Image (cartoon, helix red, strand yellow):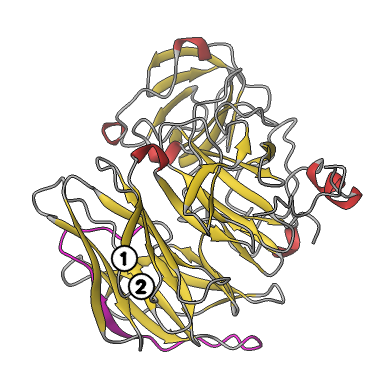
Amino acid sequence: MVFKPVGVDENGKFPTRVEEALSATIGDQVATAAQPRSFSGDSHSYDATTAVATAMDLCAIGAGPSGAYFAQGNNLRRVRPDGLFHNIGMPTGVTGAAKFIYEWNGSIYGAFIASADSLWKVWKAPAPSLSTDLAVTWTGPVLTASAGANLAGPMFGSTSTALLLAEQGDPTVAAVPEAHIFRTTDGTTWTTALTVNSPMRHFHAVAGDPYNPGTMYATGGDNQNNCLWKSTDHGATWAAIVTSKDWQAVQISFDEDWVYFAPDAVSIAALYVMDRATNTIRVGAIGSPRGLRVARPGHYGTMANTTSASTNMYLVNPGENLRDIFRPADVGSRIYGAGIPDGTTIAARVNGRQITLSAAATATATNIDFYIERNEVPLSVAFQGVVDPATGIYYGVTNNETQTPGLPYLRPVLFCVPYVGGPVVPLNDLWPVFSPSLFIANGYLWYGAHKRKLIGA
């Protein structure tokens, strides 16, 4: 294979338009209304014209030719290619919003929890028109996941003739003895294409290679050496091609030269790439997502309560948080959030879940988001990432603090690797949210409640 750093000139330099984009701060923000983003010195800037959502729980869950899809509470919303939002409706008999939306052969497929039995199931609907705002008509469920299994991450993948779903089972738990990849050729009738047993915990992702029709890859792992599988018959049969858990990964993406894998191993890597001809996997970036320096190092948190005219601030449902958030070293640090006066610091630490503010809150508020200035950047992995095949620029999201409990406190950092073998370039620190994948649609990256224009677009 001839090494070709896509998006870079013959001298290894970025075009001017890419240099300018790399030096910019974050792009547009989808949702702003419920986020206390008036922090002093905050480097973020948002496009209010797209801020039509009003809840922090807006989360990107899929993208396709018909647009980008978001979950918001018990609603599903689509952003059309022209940038307009609308609700697309929910199937009957489900609890909460979809976990993932995938578009294939003119239909969209959504994973939901069925209210009757609390199992994950898949419904399908015709993909909405590019120019109308009508709700879709869901049918199904067309697939039911194994009892006790979860559906998470980039679970759907496809070729021209087959759609597959990677089930995040957990064979280490007695109630979930197997994990499966399911397959359909008509969108309605599903068969089991691959089954794994303990000690592998679950599948992470499945994806079809658009540059090699019929070829698919699946990632998985946690407690087992088999972590990467390949199929050359549209997902009908599979073979393990990487058997070292050092290369464990999650999200999969493609350009004409490489297969890209977002790492999910105890590793310093920001990107893995594979040579298709030899199935050889290697580190694809110089540098690590760990300890990236970002615009506002510190701790972004959520689920805190304040009381008007009181200096007491505490975490909601502290029993659900398995680690302390507030630290002794936080005393004297600036803290920001809804109802917290500008210039407020942490006057005292009562315990790991309760603090005393230097100034009384101006309002009684529940479940507020907050930020504490800290001279630190947590360790992270980067198991979500996607390449822009038009430029060869790979984008990744660090998943800070996922090594310890407390997922509501994730602090994602967006970075890019401008070409295979290139450096890790931090782009933006994002508001904490856990989106199932990093998506490209309508010329933008989509993650959580964020969107950012593609570099060079």
Q: Nearer the viewer, residue 18 or 318?
A: 18
Q: Amino acid at mark 1?
A: Trp
Give x and y (percent) for residue 39: 68, 34
Residue span colored magenta: 130-152
Question: Is residue 295 visible to us here?
Answer: yes
Image quarter for residue 424? top right
Residue depicted at 49% across the width and 77% down the height: 103
Front in this rendered view, residue 20 or 283 = 283
Count how many numbered circles sit on residues in the image. Answer: 2
- Circle 2 packing at 10 Å, graded few (<14), some (14-19), many (20+), is many
Q: Is residue 101 left or right of residue 318?
A: right
Measuring from the top left, give residue 60's x and y in whole percent.
Answer: 53, 61
Residue 171 locus on image (x, y percent): 16, 50
Q: In the visual, does 40 lie left or right of 346?
A: right
Residue 138 in magenta?
Answer: yes
Kindly indicate the quadrant of the structure image that contains residue 151.
bottom left
Above or below, comparing residue 117 to residue 429 in the picture: below
**Residue hosting label 2:** 235
Q: Is residue 114 visible?
A: no
- The CA distance from mark 1 to mark 2 is 7 Å
Kindly check if marks 1 and 2 are in contact, taking CB atoms under 8 A apart as contact: yes
Task: From the image, give the main secondary structure of the stretch colored magenta.
Answer: loop
Q: Which mark is residue 395?
A: none
Residue that badge 1 annotates: 238
